Image (cartoon, helix red, strand yellow):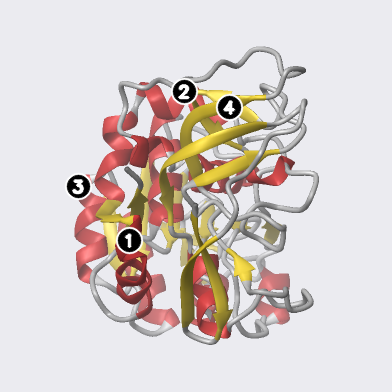
């Protein structure tokens, strides 16, 4: 079969490797779609996964896998050849699929080791496009970021970052009945998409923190921090941008006891104005991955799949994988790139 590896900075290789052979407790899944994540592009640019030793032959990549079962070990129950499934990349005993483990999902077949339904995989509807069901993993990240923020229906919320995680957070918030959700970004085309996908308002966050605060005050009303300085009435900030400017804007606009859930991956050390955070008694929460959400997403994604589908901006054959990485590492207007397999 063919599989993709990062073999150096900005170097991607698709090469022939042995077909996976399932053991008694394993299954093999023929891939149908796998999204390219922002972490994949980071590994591609850096040529490796930070903090992990270099892997002989390169780093297997891809961790948003969905496909059809093609072989089943004799001790596996609850699955049969032909079942459509989503694979939980975190459940692989040999390491996270596509994130330092020995397997990657940007490959024609994926071995699911020690396969257990409800832990390793979950069956999915086969009448939904596979590129949409492949959103399961990033939408679990988005759901965990929302859950960490503990939104109330009456909350006024702003999401910094209109990529797939931010757009997913928008959908989860609106499905939960949250009253008013603003999406902030520096790219107008992404803001336009957020508006089409249900944002109550959008905000160009390319200005100064003071300018962003003024815009939020217009949208969410006025409040104050602990020493009476005027601040936005925003209750919850969800940060998925991973940018210093976004966090500066959050701290500058935060009212007393505003909540912040951040799932943003910061490529550089973050500077935090502790005095301003103290004055707001800022409630800062970090959201990493999806401790419990990976299969909470699956049925909801199936029920509302047409709401999620618009974030997929490009569908590219596996043979043209390099094009997908080029789109996401250069200014292109790409939001979510899904790689499709025959």
Q: Check whether the beta carbons of the residues at disc 4 and disc 3 lie within 8 A of each other.
A: no
Numbered disc 1: secondary structure: helix
Query: Which of labels 4 and 3 is toward the front?
Result: 4
Question: Residue 113 vs residue 317: left or right?
Answer: right
Cα distance in 3D space between marks 4 and 3: 41 Å
Q: Which tag, 3 or 1, sits closer to the chain's start?
A: 3
Query: Which of labels 3 and 1 is toward the front?
Result: 1
Q: Kindly identify which residue carries mark 1.
A: 319
* Observer able to see residue 217: no
Query: Which of labels 2 and 1 is toward the front?
Result: 1
Residue ID at (26%, 63%): 190
On residue 196, which mark appears? Answer: 3
Q: Residues within 10 Å of mark 3 (few under 14, many from 20)?
A: few
Cα distance in 3D space between marks 3 and 1: 32 Å
Q: Kindly identify which residue carries mark 4.
A: 71
Q: Check whether the beta carbons of the residues at disc 2 and disc 1 lie within 8 A of each other.
A: no
The location of residue 59, given as percent across then percent down, is 63, 70
Cα distance in 3D space between marks 3 and 2: 27 Å
Q: Kindly identify which residue carries mark 2.
A: 124
Question: Residue 15 vs residue 295: left or right?
Answer: left
């Amino acid at each position: 079969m063919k599989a993709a590896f990062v073999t150096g900075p900005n170097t991607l290789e698709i090469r022939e490797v042995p077909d996976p052979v399932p053991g008694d407790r394993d299954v093999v899944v023929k891939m149908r779609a796998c999204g390219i994540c922002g972490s994949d592009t980071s590994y591609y640019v850096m040529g490796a996964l930070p903090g992990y030793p270099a892997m002989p032959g390169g780093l297997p990549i891809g961790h948003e896998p969905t496909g059809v079962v093609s072989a089943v070990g004799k001790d596996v129950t609850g699955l049969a050849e032909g079942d459509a499934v989503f694979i939980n990349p975190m459940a692989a005993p040999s390491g996270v699929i596509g994130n330092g483990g020995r397997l990657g999902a940007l490959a024609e077949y994926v071995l699911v080791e020690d396969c257990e339904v409800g832990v390793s995989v979950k069956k999915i509807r086969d009448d939904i496009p596979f590129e949409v069901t492949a959103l399961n993993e990033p939408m679990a990240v988005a759901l965990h970021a929302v859950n960490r923020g503990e939104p109330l229906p009456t909350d006024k919320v702003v999401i910094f970052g209109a990529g797939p995680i931010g757009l997913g957070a928008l959908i989860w918030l609106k499905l939960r009945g949250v009253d008013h959700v603003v999406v902030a970004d520096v790219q107008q085309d992404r803001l336009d998409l957020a508006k089409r996908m249900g944002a109550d308002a959008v905000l160009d966050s390319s200005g100064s923190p003071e300018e962003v605060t003024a815009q939020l005050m217009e949208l969410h009303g006025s409040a104050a921090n602990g020493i009476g300085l005027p601040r936005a009435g925003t209750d919850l900030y969800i940060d998925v941008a991973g940018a210093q400017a976004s966090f500066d804007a959050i701290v500058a606009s935060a009212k007393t006891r505003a909540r912040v859930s951040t799932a943003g991956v910061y490529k550089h050390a973050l500077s935090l104005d502790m005095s301003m955070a103290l004055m707001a008694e800022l409630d800062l929460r970090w959201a990493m991955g999806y401790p419990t959400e990976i299969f909470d997403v699956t049925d909801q994604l199936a029920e509302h799949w047409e709401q999620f589908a618009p974030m997929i901006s490009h569908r590219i054959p596996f043979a043209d994988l390099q094009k997908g990485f080029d789109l996401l590492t250069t200014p292109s207007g790409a939001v979510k790139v899904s790689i499709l397999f025959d």
